[in-house]
Amino acid sequence: MLNATGKPGLAKIGTRLLRRARIDVVAFRNAPDSVRGGILDSTRVVVRRGDSGVGERIRRALGVGRVSVQLDSARLLDASVFLGVDFAPTRLEFHP
């Protein structure tokens, strides 16, 4: 889970949403500038192993996102999530 919104704390909130949906999150942090190229307009869910169903489940839990499949068996994860500015959690989602 990489936060590419420029707003601190959203990767943690996204992680909570996914974990509530029983989706395991390996790590969360701010996206490096090289990944962001600035700030992403829209959330991207990139499937690394499996099919697009993996990404759709994540997209539904977050409420936003575009799903693409870029298989990479060298990565030890099913999907990469890049949060964009369209990720706007409600106030209740900020509470632990």
Image (cartoon, helix red, strand yellow):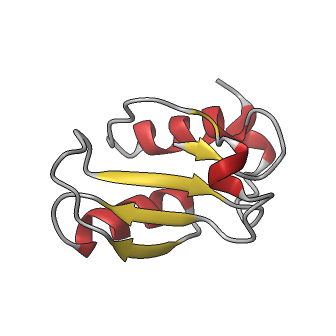
Residue 27 % position (x, y): 45, 29
Residue placed farthest to the right in the image? Answer: 7
What is the x, y in percent for residue 78? 25, 51
Q: Position of residue 80 (x, y in %)?
A: 42, 52
54 over 68 or under it: above or below = above
- Residue drawn at (71%, 28%), measured in percent from left and top? 95
Whether 76 is drawn above or below 48: the answer is: above
- Residue 55 locus on image (x, y percent): 35, 65
At a point 39% along the width and 35% down the height, the residue shown is 25
Decide which of 36, 50 is in the foreground and name it.
Answer: 36
Residue ID at (75%, 33%): 9
Q: Residue furthest front?
A: 34
Q: Quadrant of the C terminus?
A: top right
Q: Considering depth in this image, is 94 or 33 the residue closer to the camera?
A: 33
Q: Nearer the viewer, residue 36 or 78?
A: 36
In the rendered view, does 88 fall on the left or right side of 73?
A: right
Which residue sits furthest top? 96
Say which residue appears at 79% left-offset and 59% top-offset: 39
The mark total stands at: 0
